[in-house]
Image (cartoon, rainbow, N blue to C red):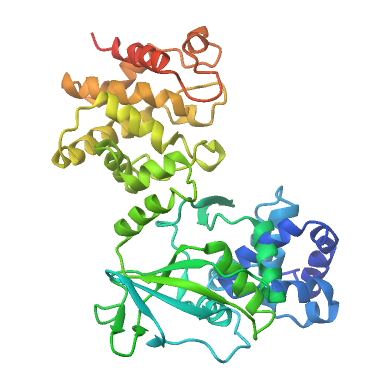
């Protein structure tokens, strides 16, 4: 710890915020989700905040991690809290901390489930006790994968944007309570043994004769469906090891692309936000272009699968808005052309962000707003068709007044909430198209 900082001062800092925490159950659940990565569960947190003796006996690493979360929730005006307590090397070491589990009976691989039936190609069904559901998560075998979740949730942690499970704290608490009381209704979870994670090239082995399914060494089970129940059952298990009840678990062995197709099928019963559904379904070749743009280039981390853009998180455009714009401005007739369009748009965006980076933080500028990408994509397509180098992009965009006070935008419906009408979208495209004469 830094000079002048002591364990006692840290405990007093935490104690000062405990009265605020006990008044906000939802914040308590959010902190629990964040500290779970360090194997610190909600039961551990409750012990610390309810019993000062436990708080004083808690090791320094856990005190610092709890203190950090309390500061982020109740004193966000001080984002450098951890830097006040630890040196950079100490902070780096803290990020690798894991609380030792008091449960010795963890699950190790290979692990065999009995009474399993095959339900399809690389798909199997089993009835698992809730204690096993909890143990799988506690043991690090089942886990969260934002790539196959219906909609990952972005959180701002200091200067870093991270993806976490998009969970409803109220639902978590209700499910946990039902699990502890033994009256949680049995439902179906889906765990996918991710292709490529098995040490020997295989993730699952099914014995037809014995009707047993073995999860092989190295395999990770991504939670494809049932994240709320899985995490809640885990929290309940950390408080009570002899849980009652069972869950039906469908085990699969698919690639991430196949998992996304399953998400589309499940959307028929459980609605998914339309932009995310479009992204998973890959209905158009323009969708594949956007998926590539999400991976690399200037738009990496700036495209959201949600219906609304969170500009404070660095997002600038929705998946569906960008895909529709590409579909309207580029003629993509085969998958061979997808890569070429990606290259064109990435080059355009490179110069756009380089020339006009100050507009990103200018609240009076519409240059990087979601609806404006209809025009940017149109201009990129026209410049490419006319073999105009993107190096002189500023010569064209400087002809447009992107100020929010420009009456043109109101005429086009840009300042209105919701989506642009087809008519207004075409008008906006025209504004950018006529720049190329």
Q: Is residue 367 left or right of residue 19?
A: left
Q: Residue at x 30, y 65 (%)?
A: 254
Q: 128 or 241: which is nearer to us?
A: 128
Q: How many marks?
A: 0
Residue 423: where, in percent of width, then height? Answer: 39, 13
Residue 10: where, in percent of width, then height? Answer: 77, 69
Task: Using the rendered view, name the quadrant where residue 213 is placed.
Answer: bottom left
Q: Is residue 162 left or right of residue 179?
A: left
Q: 366 or 90: which is nearer to us?
A: 366
Q: 218 or 422: which is nearer to us?
A: 422
**Rendered position, 57 above or below 17:** below
Q: Residue at x 16, y 37 (%)?
A: 337
> Which quadrant: the N terminus?
bottom right
Q: 81 or 313: which is nearer to us?
A: 313
Residue 300: where, in percent of width, then height? Answer: 38, 44
**Rendered position, 317 above or below 297:** above
Could you tell me if residue 436 is visible in this image?
yes
Could you tell me if residue 1 is visible in this image?
no
Residue 191: where, in percent of width, then height? Answer: 42, 69
Q: Residue at x 77, y 76 (%)?
A: 47
> Which quadrant: the C terminus?
top left
Task: Using the rendered view, name the quadrant where residue 276 is placed.
Answer: top left
**Rendered position, 273 above or below 166:** above
**Rendered position, 366 above or below 11:** above
């Amino acid at each position: 710890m830094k000079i002048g900082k002591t364990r006692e001062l840290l405990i007093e800092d935490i104690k000062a915020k405990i009265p605020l925490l006990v008044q906000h159950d939802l914040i308590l659940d959010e902190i629990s989700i964040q500290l779970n990565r360090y194997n610190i569960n909600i039961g551990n947190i409750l012990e610390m905040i309810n019993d000062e003796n436990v708080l004083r006996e808690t090791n320094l690493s856990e005190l610092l991690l709890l203190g950090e979360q309390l500061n982020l929730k109740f004193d966000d005006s001080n984002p450098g809290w951890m830097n006040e307590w630890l040196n950079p090397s100490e902070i780096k070491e803290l990020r690798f901390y894991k609380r030792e589990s008091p449960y010795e009976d963890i699950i190790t691989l290979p692990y065999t489930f009995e009474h399993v039936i095959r339900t399809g190609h690389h798909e199997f069904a089993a009835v698992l006790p809730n204690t096993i559901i909890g143990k799988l998560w506690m043991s690090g075998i089942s886990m969260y994968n934002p790539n196959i979740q219906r909609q990952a949730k972005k959180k701002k942690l200091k200067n870093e944007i991270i993806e976490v499970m998009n969970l409803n704290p109220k639902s978590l608490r209700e499910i946990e309570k039902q699990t502890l009381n033994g009256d949680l209704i049995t439902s179906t979870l889906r765990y996918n043994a991710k292709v490529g994670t098995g040490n020997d090239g295989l993730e699952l082995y099914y014995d037809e004769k014995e009707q047993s399914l073995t999860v092989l060494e190295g395999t990770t089970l991504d939670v494809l469906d049932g994240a709320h129940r899985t995490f809640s059952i885990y929290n309940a298990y950390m408080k009570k090891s002899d849980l009652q009840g069972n869950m039906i678990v469908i085990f699969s062995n698919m690639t991430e692309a196949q998992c996304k197709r399953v998400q589309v099928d499940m959307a028929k019963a459980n609605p998914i936000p339309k932009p995310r559904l479009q992204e998973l379904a890959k209905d158009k070749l323009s969708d594949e272009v956007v998926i590539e743009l999400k991976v690399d280039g200037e738009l990496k981390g700036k495209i959201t699968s949600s219906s609304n853009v969170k500009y404070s998180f660095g997002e600038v455009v929705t998946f569906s808005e960008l895909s529709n714009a590409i579909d309207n401005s580029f003629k993509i007739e085969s998958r061979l052309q997808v890569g070429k369009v990606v290259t064109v748009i990435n080059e355009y965006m490179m110069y756009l962000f380089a020339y006009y980076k100050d507009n990103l933080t200018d609240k009076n500028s519409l240059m990087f707003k979601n609806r404006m990408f209809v025009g940017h994509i149109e201009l990129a397509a026209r410049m490419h068709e006319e073999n105009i180098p993107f190096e002189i992009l500023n010569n064209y965009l400087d002809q447009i007044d992107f100020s929010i006070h420009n009456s043109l935008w109101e005429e086009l419906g840009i300042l209105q909430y919701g989506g642009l009408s087809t008519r207004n979208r075409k008008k906006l495209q025209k504004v950018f198209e006529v720049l190329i004469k």
